[in-house]
Image (spheres, helix red, strand yellow):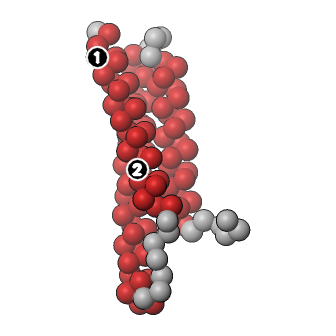
């Protein structure tokens, strides 16, 4: 793309990376340590909620810029990132389901 991400996209990307790492740990823990799997699933969901807050902040900032300049559009990647985050949350919730079902 040739441009560095703005502060909102950079924050969202960092939160997504951390959440996916927690999700990986949750998967690896499923057969060995249910408590760890659940904690990591919770951390995944918490991280994705942080992404959602960053998304809302970014959209508010973009709309404010749009009001001022009438030529600024919200970055196209934001809706895609938001949808991807929802998928990560669904997977983390399935880990909860797997642990509860095993009990």
Above or below residue 23? Residue 46 is below
**On-image quarter of the C terminus:** top left
Q: Residue at x 37, y 45 (%)?
A: 86
Quick one: label 1, few (<14), some, or many (20+) residues within 10 Å?
A: few
Q: Residue at x 48, y 82 (%)?
A: 72
Q: Nearer the viewer, residue 36 or 3?
A: 3
Looking at the image, do the residues carrying marks 1 and 2 touch, with CB atoms under 8 Å apart? no
Q: Is residue 80 visible?
A: yes
Above or below residue 49? Residue 2 is below
| Residue 59 location (% of width, % of height) | 39, 69
Rendering quarter of residue 96? top left
| Residue 78 location (% of width, % of height) | 46, 61
The disc placed on residue 45 is none
**On-image quarter of the N terminus:** bottom right
Rendering quarter of residue 70? bottom left
The disc placed on residue 83 is 2
Q: In this view, which residue lies farthest toward the bottom? A: 69
Q: Is residue 50 visible?
A: no
Query: Element at badge 1?
Result: helix
Q: Residue at x 36, y 64 (%)?
A: 56
Q: In this view, which residue lies farthest toward the right? A: 2
Circle nearer the viewer, 1 or 2 = 2
* Residue tagged 1: 100
Q: Nearer the viewer, residue 13 or 40?
A: 13
Query: Element at badge 2?
Result: helix
Q: Residue at x 50, y 47 (%)?
A: 16
Counting residues from the start of the chain, the first of labels 1 and 2 encountered is: 2
Quick one: label 2, few (<14), some, or many (20+) residues within 10 Å?
A: few
Alpha carbons under labels 1 and 2: distance apart? 26 Å
Above or below residue 57? Residue 99 is above
| Residue 5 location (% of width, % of height) | 60, 65
């Amino acid at each position: 793309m040739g441009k560095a991400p703005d502060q909102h996209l950079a924050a969202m990307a960092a939160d997504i990376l951390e959440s996916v790492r927690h999700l990986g740990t949750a998967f690896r823990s499923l057969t060995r340590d249910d408590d760890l799997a659940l904690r990591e699933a919770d951390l995944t969901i918490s991280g994705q909620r942080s992404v959602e807050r960053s998304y809302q902040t970014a959209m508010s900032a973009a709309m404010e810029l749009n009001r001022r300049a009438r030529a600024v559009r919200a970055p196209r990647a934001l809706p895609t990132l938001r949808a991807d985050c929802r998928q990560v949350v669904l997977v983390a919730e399935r880990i909860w389901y797997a642990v509860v079902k095993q009990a």
